[in-house]
Amino acid sequence: MKTAKLILDDKEYEIPVVAGTENEPALDIRKLRDTTGLITYDPGYANTGSCKSGITFIDGDRGILRYRGYPIEELAGNVRFSAAAYLLIYGRMPSEAEFMEWRKQLTLNSFIHASQVNFFDNYSVHAHPMNILSAMVSSISSFYPHIGGENDNMDQHIHRLIGQVKTIAAFSYRKSVGLPYVYPRTDHSYSANFLRMMFATPAEEYVVPKVMENALDMLLILHMDHEQNCSTSTVRMVASSMSNIYASVSAGINALWGRLHGGANEAVLTMLQRIADDGSDYKKYVEMAKRKDDPFKLMGFGHRVYKNFDPRSKILKKAVDDVLTEMGIQDPLLDIAKNLEEVALKDDFFIERKLYPNVDFYSGILYRALGIPTEMFTVLFAIGRMPGWIAHWLEMSKDPDLRIQRPRQVYTGETLRHYEKTIYP
Ligand code: ACO
């Protein structure tokens, strides 16, 4: 076994080096505190491997993303979202029979409990759909009090989570615009069902345009997993205390909501609109993003892991062009986005910091072309990410190294002082 040496106060310690199947080395510091009295200090966990995982491989320097070994370029645009979700969760592509059964189960389990439908009436009219989504997903487990018990059927919880997340999303939209709810059908794919539930009226047949169904499948697959990102780490953190899968995933939805994570897709569109309203002077905004005294950042740019092109943004950029052309849409925000990208990629500030467009940079323009309202963009991300959260929850629950996640800290507060008795009124 390879080891690294740590020399501290003239004492030498051997630290084992572990490596995964792609040979990425890591220091195994599990015994570090016991043997040396030291802990590590790593704000943002940029150098910390929190687990071993066999789900998704990313090489940020080479712009590589693979689900269960399959390159993202071979999946996005070529398979249905539900087939890719099966792959991510069960580790292999389904046979045709398995796929048809899986797709049917996702639809049959997509009906939220009739009592829970009434919950929609009680949210504030100003509630953000991510707010509704996290509360609703957390509430599902209240209808299954025996979850996690003996004879519990985990597969059914998986079907419910993937099936119901799109129902909750579509219903929250329908509620916000005062339209009646539309229910899914077993003869539709996952994405076709979602689009139907969003846009059909009960008065007439709604034929889901293939171009929209395929684009949504691709978008959801691109968002499906990204190893130990903020929301997935949150799901794992909550799950490590043995919380149920709905509670864990609901916490992940809240983590995704922030604008530095999944909320960035909404923030990109808001930024592009702001630039358009401000005379489309995109160069001014690139300059603003570079200023230390200005909190403005170029939303949809930069990534903790990718120090090269995000492969998802490459796929998306091409797809945006293709889909908008096929749908006959001319979007002025797309021109602004392309101009911003071109200027930023030639700018030393962005070159030195290796800042490239990420998955959120072009996704909003595609969602907009599909008729998805801006405040629903992050909800769409959550629908796509659901199989990823589930796969990580399952992997973690079987991990022999599982311990409750409980980081340490470097204390910087007051040292010992004593309380002087005071009479407070
Ligand atoms: N615009 C301008 N400057 C940026 C940007 C940006 N979008 N992103 C990073 N920088 C700068 C930082 O100010 C910092 O500069 P400095 O070294 O002079 O201090 C340097 O680049 C490094 O950035 P960090 O913030 O340290 O990088 P970190 O890995 O912590 O954050 C993050 C990554 C959150 C994605 C960041 O790049 C960002 O805020 N981007 C905009 C929001 C965004 O698009 N989020 C979506 C990410 S993808 C996803 O979650 C699906």
Image (cartoon, rainbow, N blue to C red):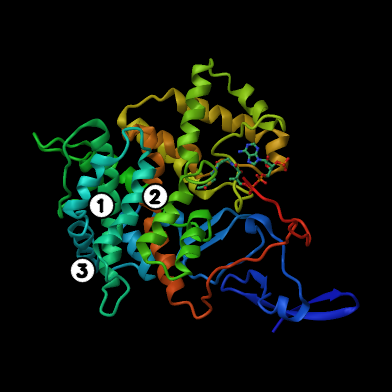
Q: Residue at x 46, y 31 (%)?
A: 269
| Image quadrant in which you'd find residue 47 | bottom right
Q: Position of residue 261 (x, y in %)?
A: 52, 46
Q: Indicate which disc, 1 or 2, sits on the residue closer to the N terminus.
A: 1
| Mark-to-mark CA distance, 3 and 2 | 27 Å
User: Is residue 143 shown left or right of residue 404?
Assistant: left
Would you place residue 334 above or below residue 224 in this image?
above
Residue 84, how many percent across, how many down?
A: 35, 59
Along the viewing direction, whichever of 177 and 126 lies nearer the viewer: 126
Residue designated by label 1: 190
Instruction: Using the rendered view, name the quadrant where residue 370 is placed.
Output: top left
Residue receiving disc 3 = 97
Structural crowding at the residue carrying mark 2, measured as other residues with C-alpha within 10 Å and reported as few (<14), some (14–19) or many (≥20): many
**Which kind of residue does numbered mark 3 sit on?**
Ala
Task: Single out the mark in the foreground, 1 or 3.
Answer: 1
Q: Position of residue 108 (x, y in %)?
A: 17, 59
The mark lying in front, picked from 1 and 2, is 2
